[in-house]
Image: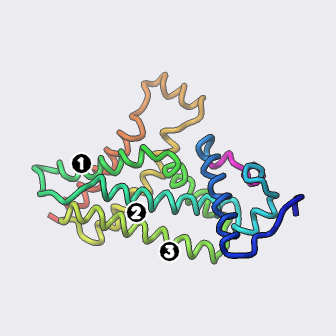
C-alpha cells in the first residue's frame, strides 16, 4: 500500500473512494482522449497507487465504462426534456428530421459521452471481468431501450423493433462518426487540403435522419 493509505471498509467509505476515482477519470477525459489516459496517470490524479485503485474497480476500462453509464443516463434524461411532448406528424419526414436532429445536437454537446461511446466496443469492453461485463451490458441494454422508447413516443409510427434498431443505430453511428470527425493532426491537415468534411453534428444529424426516416418508411 502507498504511504498513508487506509483501506475503505465501511460502505460509505467505499462509495466515497469510488466517487473520487470516477471524478478523476472525468477530469482527465476533459483534457485528452480515453486512449491516452493510463491507469498510472489516473491513480496519480486521485492520489492512490494503481493496486489500490484496483481494489475498487476491475480495471482502467471498467472505470471509464462506469463514467459512460452515468453520462448516458444523464443524457437520456435531458433528451426527454428537450424533445418535449409528442406532436402531430409533419409533411414528409420533417418530424423525423427534427427528432434525429435533436438527438444529434444534444450528443454533439457531450464530448465525453461521444468519446466513450466510440471507445466502448473496441477498447473499453476488452479488459473487464465476466461479472462486470454482465452488469454493464444489462445497463447498456436498458439505456438503449429507453432511447428507443423516447423516440417512439414522438414517432409512434415506428414499430417497437424499429425503435430498438434506431437506438442501436445511434450507438453504431456515433462510434464511427466520432473518431472520423476527430482525426490526428496529419489526417486533419490532409482532409482540409481536399476540401474538408461535414462537422460531427451535421454528419450525425444527416445519418440519424436517414436511419429514422427509413425505418418509418418501411412501416408505411
- The image shows residue 206, relative to residue 211, as above or below, that is above
The numbered mark at residue 168 is: 2
The x and y percentages for residue 3 are 89, 58
The x and y percentages for residue 133 are 60, 72
Quadrant the C terminus occupies: bottom left
Image quadrant assignment for residue 123: bottom right
* Within-10-Å neighbours for mark 1: few <14, some 14–19, many 20+: some
The numbered mark at residue 138 is: 3
The x and y percentages for residue 131 are 63, 77
Callouts 2 and 1 close, C-beta under 8 Å: no
The answer to whether residue 40 is magenta is: yes
Q: Which residue is painted at 67% across and 75% down in the image? A: 11
Callouts 1 and 3 close, C-beta under 8 Å: no
The total of numbered circles placed on residues is 3
> Which residues, given as a range, are shown in magenta?
34-43
* Within-10-Å neighbours for mark 3: few <14, some 14–19, many 20+: few
Between 33 and 171, the residue placed more toward the observer is 33
User: Going from the N terminus, do you reach mark 3 or mark 2 first?
Assistant: 3
Between 59 and 56, the residue placed more toward the observer is 56
Q: Which residue is painted at 64% across and 46% down in the image? A: 28
The residue wearing badge 1 is 97
Display colour scheme:
rainbow
Q: Secondary structure at mark 2?
A: helix
Amino acid at each position: 500500500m502507498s504511504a498513508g493509505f487506509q483501506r475503505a471498509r465501511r460502505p460509505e467509505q467505499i462509495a466515497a473512494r469510488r466517487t473520487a476515482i470516477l471524478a478523476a477519470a472525468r477530469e482527465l477525459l476533459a483534457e485528452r482522449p480515453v486512449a491516452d489516459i493510463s491507469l498510472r496517470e489516473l491513480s496519480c490524479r486521485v492520489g492512490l497507487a494503481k493496486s489500490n485503485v484496483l481494489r475498487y474497480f476491475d480495471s482502467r476500462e471498467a472505470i471509464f465504462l462506469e463514467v459512460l453509464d452515468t453520462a448516458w443516463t444523464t443524457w437520456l434524461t435531458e433528451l426527454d426534456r428537450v424533445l418535449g411532448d409528442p406532436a402531430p406528424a409533419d409533411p414528409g419526414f420533417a418530424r423525423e428530421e427534427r427528432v434525429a436532429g435533436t438527438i444529434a445536437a444534444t450528443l454533439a454537446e457531450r464530448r465525453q459521452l461521444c468519446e466513450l461511446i466510440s471507445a466502448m466496443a473496441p477498447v473499453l469492453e476488452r479488459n473487464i471481468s465476466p461479472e462486470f461485463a454482465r452488469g454493464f451490458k444489462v445497463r447498456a441494454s436498458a439505456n438503449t431501450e429507453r432511447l428507443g422508447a423516447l423516440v417512439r413516443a414522438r414517432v409512434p409510427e415506428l414499430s417497437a423493433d424499429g425503435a430498438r434498431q434506431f437506438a442501436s443505430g445511434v450507438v453504431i453511428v456515433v462510434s464511427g462518426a466520432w473518431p472520423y470527425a476527430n482525426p490526428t493532426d496529419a489526417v486533419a491537415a490532409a482532409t482540409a487540403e481536399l476540401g474538408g468534411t461535414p462537422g460531427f453534428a451535421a454528419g450525425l444529424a444527416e445519418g440519424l435522419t436517414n436511419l429514422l426516416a427509413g425505418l418509418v418508411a418501411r412501416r408505411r
